[in-house]
Image: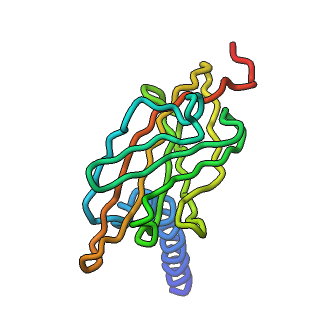
Amino acid sequence: MRQTKMWWLASALVALVLGGVLLLDFSSLRAPPAVFSGAVVSLPLLSDCNPVLSPHAQEGCRAQDSSRAMTLKMSGDVRPLRPFELRLILPETVRTQATEASVEFVMVGMDMGINRYTLLKQANGDFGGKVILPVCSIGRSDWVAKLSVVVSLADGGAQEMWTAEMPFTAEPSVVAHD
């Protein structure tokens, strides 16, 4: 009788531990919490612009519609595996209402993994940070910076997420490719 109780107790303990491990391992399959529930507005580029190689790179590249705008500036050695500065500039009228911003680097037709950075709000209301591009194994350097900014609207706490896709070409990698 005593052995039966010990066996049941040991079995229950193993089941609890195994259940806890399974919950931890499969926690990544749960849906993430809803982060944003407002309107998403995609801003078109004003013109073909390369924030790295164009003659007007210091001015940055601008996306805007009739009432919203954002400008992307990149500075430093913009090439794979080298940290460089990225600035996202918003109109002065919304700088205090912008709460968060991020950039994701993607390559059309190529899986480059997750390359998403949260940009930090600067004292002047711009967003910025140091970012790094990964190396493409076949030597491509054509990228798209997918920008997003969350702006709180004046009317009762509603929010908009402004997005823009800005293609650019990085400097060639210093790593030799086969």
Q: Residue at x 33, y 55 (%)?
A: 68
Determine the residue located farthest toward the bottom in the rendered image.
2
In the image shown, does 60 or 146 lie closer to the viewer? Answer: 60
Above or below 37: residue 104: above
Image x and y of residue 18, in percent: 51, 66
Q: Residue at x 55, y 65 (%)?
A: 121
Q: Residue at x 70, y 44 (%)?
A: 83
Q: Is residue 60 left or right of residue 44?
A: right
In the image shown, does 18 or 46 lie closer to the viewer? Answer: 46
Q: Residue at x 30, y 68 (%)?
A: 159
Q: Quadrant of residue 6?
A: bottom right
Above or below 155: residue 36: above
Image x and y of residue 30, in percent: 38, 61
How is colour applied across the structure in the image? rainbow
Above or below 42: residue 78: above
**In the rendered image, which quarter contains the C terminus?**
top right
Image x and y of residue 15, in percent: 48, 71
Image x and y of residue 160, in percent: 30, 63
Q: Is residue 19 left or right of residue 10?
A: left
Q: Quadrant of residue 166?
A: top left
